[in-house]
Image: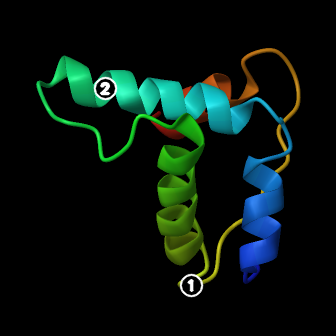
Amino acid sequence: MMMATADLIEKHYTLDPEWRRITGRKVYKGYLSKGLTPPSNDPYELTARILKVLVSYMTAGPILAIVLEGAHAVRLFAARRRH
């Protein structure tokens, strides 16, 4: 258990320099597929909004930090938790 800082969360989610572009494009397409008007067509602006909400949520209380390694590690971990 730990309290995450805004800096830690931002660094974690932006380790991959393509994260902002890829996520922003997915969000943009998601708005369009639902017939909604995106607040911006700039993927970096869209992910800035997401990151702001994510940081607020993740720093609101303690988190459980887990290191998972291996192919499909997150999916396998989540499947075990359901049983």
The one of 69 and 6 positioned closer to us in this rendering: 6
Q: How far is mark 1 from mark 2, CA to CA?
A: 29 Å
Residue 7 percent coordinates (x, y): 80, 73
Q: Residue at left 74%, top 62%? A: 10
Q: Are marks 1 and 2 in contact (CB under 8 Å)?
A: no
- Pointer 1 local density, CA inside 10 Å: few below 14, some 14–19, many at least 20: few
Given the image, on which type of amino acid does mark 1 rest? Gly
Q: Residue at left 83%, top 35%? A: 16
Q: Residue at left 63%, top 81%? A: 62
Residue 39 percent coordinates (x, y): 30, 47
In the picture, the quarter occupied by the N terminus is bottom right
10 over 74 or under it: above or below: below
Read off the residue under disc 1: 61
Q: Residue at left 65%, top 24%? A: 76
- Pointer 2 local density, CA inside 10 Å: few below 14, some 14–19, many at least 20: some
Residue 24 percent coordinates (x, y): 52, 34
Read off the residue under disc 2: 30
13 over 75 or under it: above or below: below
Given the image, on which type of amino acid does mark 2 rest? Gly
Visible residue check, residue 69: yes
Visible residue check, residue 1: no
Res. 59 image quadrant: bottom right
Decide which of tag 1 and tag 2 comes sooner along the chain.
Answer: 2
In front: mark 1 or mark 2? 2
The one of 49 and 40 positioned closer to us in this rendering: 40
Res. 6 image quadrant: bottom right
Query: Is label 1 in a helix, a strand or a loop?
Result: loop
Query: Is label 2 in a helix, a strand or a loop?
Result: helix
